[in-house]
Amino acid sequence: MMKKVLWILWLLAMPLPLWATPTSDLNQVGQGSMRWLFWELYQARFYSADGAYRAGDFPQALALRYRRNIGKEDLLDATVTEWQRLGIDWKPQWRNQLDALWPSVRNGDELVVRVEPTGVSRFYFNWQSLGEVSDPAFGPAFLAIWLSPNSRDPGLTRQLKGN
């Protein structure tokens, strides 16, 4: 009996990946909301290892909690439009990879990207793994949509960077 109790206690003390989230080992840097006219589109939170923003210092994660229903094609088109607007040298296969990974989103859904020090970008939807993009140029290009000095919403960028 004692052996069984010790076994259960040991299991409870073990940090299992099942209980981990994409941001559980990171610290929040900042947060804010993206609005269009009168509507809140999403709430954003940005994370880093030490809670400070430093470009290229990975791991980093961006979590987007959607406040509206948005179709997958609209998400993909908006991503490519922003890369083009920012002058980012994006690769067409990135859109294809995202098309294979992303679902449409509904109010309350959360999409998280985590960029690892190895350059791999992992996506999560409502805390379930969607898959990854292994191109090390992808993560910085994707995060630039929110973190670039020329982002569509400089106020949100400042908030995410903790300024």
Image: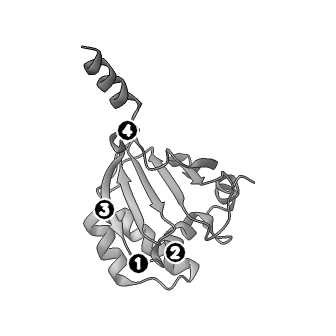
Q: CA distance from mark 3 to mark 2?
A: 18 Å
Marked residue nearer the N-terminal end (1 or 2): 1
Instruction: Tell me: residue 145, above or below residue 46.
Output: below
Q: CA distance from mark 4 to mark 1?
A: 28 Å
Q: CA distance from mark 4 to mark 2?
A: 30 Å
Q: Nearer the viewer, mark 3 or mark 2?
A: 3
For mark 3, give the secondary structure: strand
Q: What amino acid is found at the position of numbered circle 2 in the picture?
A: Ala
Q: Nearer the viewer, mark 3 or mark 4?
A: 4
Name the residue nearer the viewer: 46 or 75: 46
Q: Quadrant of residue 161?
A: bottom right
Q: For mark 2, does the 10 Å Cα neighbourhood hold few (<14), some (14 to 19), or many (20 or more) residues? A: some
Residue 19: assigned label? 4
Q: What amino acid is found at the position of numbered circle 4 in the picture?
A: Trp
Q: For mark 1, what is the residue?
A: 135
Task: Give the percent coordinates (x, y) of residue 23.
Answer: 49, 48
Task: Give the percent coordinates (x, y) of residue 39.
Answer: 52, 46
Q: For mark 2, what is the residue?
A: 141
Residue 131: assigned label? 3
Q: Is residue 73 left or right of residue 40?
A: left
Q: What amino acid is found at the position of numbered circle 3 in the picture?
A: Gly
Can residue 32 be seen here? The reply is no
Q: CA distance from mark 1 to mark 2?
A: 10 Å
Q: Nearer the viewer, mark 1 or mark 2?
A: 1
